[in-house]
Image: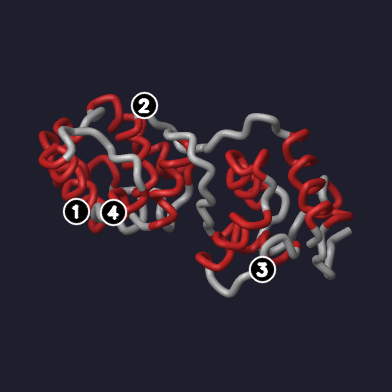
Amino acid sequence: MKPAVIEQFFARLQAQNPEPKGELEYTNVYTLLVAVVLSAQATDTGVNKATRALFKKVKTPKDMLKLGEAGLKEHIKTIGLFNGKAKNVIALSQILADRYNGEVPHTREELVALPGVGRKTANVVLNIFFGQPTMAVDTHIFRISNRTGLAKGKDVLAVEEKLEKVVPPEYRLHAHHWLILHGRYVCKARKPDCPTCVVRDLCEFKDKTV
């Protein structure tokens, strides 16, 4: 896409949803981090159902360590891969308690060093809580970026780097939210809802639905 087309692309998404929000529920930066770790290969809806009761009890790493791995598993057993996720959450909580006085660090390098925290998870936390203009490329953003011609890439890192180059500065803070929501509800994997798409005429996808 040409720069002018990309600017129009995000201008329309902004007009449709001026202040996009992530759909994971959390009470502070720590519970946001935990929720994002739990959301890997799971739906936000499923994570929210599991964490509502959990986050009434747990608000800090010390709370989580007091609950323990077995107690955590009882809360999150409906989430896919919950055994491994529980182990990671307990491990990262221990590190936060020991090294960071219970606080969540706000650099990507420190975040990705935590158990269960990859680049995408770190980018989500940095964007949502710390207001950094990161691109957390998930399956939706990867699909949309390639399908529309917005930022083509063979893997998520290539797409992330391309988006960081092509998205106009004024749209970078909310760009990943607009793309995720657009991919979740409009530009869906199996059958995109092209007739309702606000960027239909800007999109380079050849097999548009009618």
Mark closer to the chain start, 3 or 4: 4
Coloring scheme of the render? secondary structure
Q: Residues within 10 Å of mark 2 (few under 14, many from 20)?
A: few
Task: Please tell me the numbered disc located at residue 152.
Answer: 3
Q: Nearer the viewer, residue 80 or 204?
A: 204
Mark 3 and mark 2: Cα distance apart in space: 35 Å
Say which amino acid is labelled 1: Lys
Residue identified by numbered label 2: 27
Task: Please tell me the numbered disc located at residue 87.
Answer: 1
Q: Is residue 189 left or right of residue 93?
A: right
Q: Residues within 10 Å of mark 3 (few under 14, many from 20)?
A: many
Residue identified by numbered label 4: 82
Q: Is residue 21 above or below residue 84?
A: above
Mark 3 and mark 4: Cα distance apart in space: 33 Å
Q: Position of residue 153 (x, y in %)?
A: 61, 71
Residue name at image x 65 percent, y 43 percent: 169
Say which amino acid is labelled 2: Thr
**Is the Cβ of the residue at disc 4 closer than 8 Å to that at disc 2?**
no
Mark 3 and mark 1: Cα distance apart in space: 35 Å
Say which amino acid is labelled 3: Lys
Q: Position of residue 130 (x, y in %)?
A: 43, 34
Mark 4 and mark 2: Cα distance apart in space: 21 Å
Mark 1 and mark 4: Cα distance apart in space: 9 Å
Residue name at image x 64 percent, y 63 percent: 143
The number of numbered discs placed on residues in the rendered structure image is 4
Task: Please tell me the numbered disc located at residue 25.
Answer: none
Mark 1 and mark 2: Cα distance apart in space: 22 Å
Q: Nearer the viewer, residue 105 or 52?
A: 105
Mark closer to the chain start, 1 or 2: 2
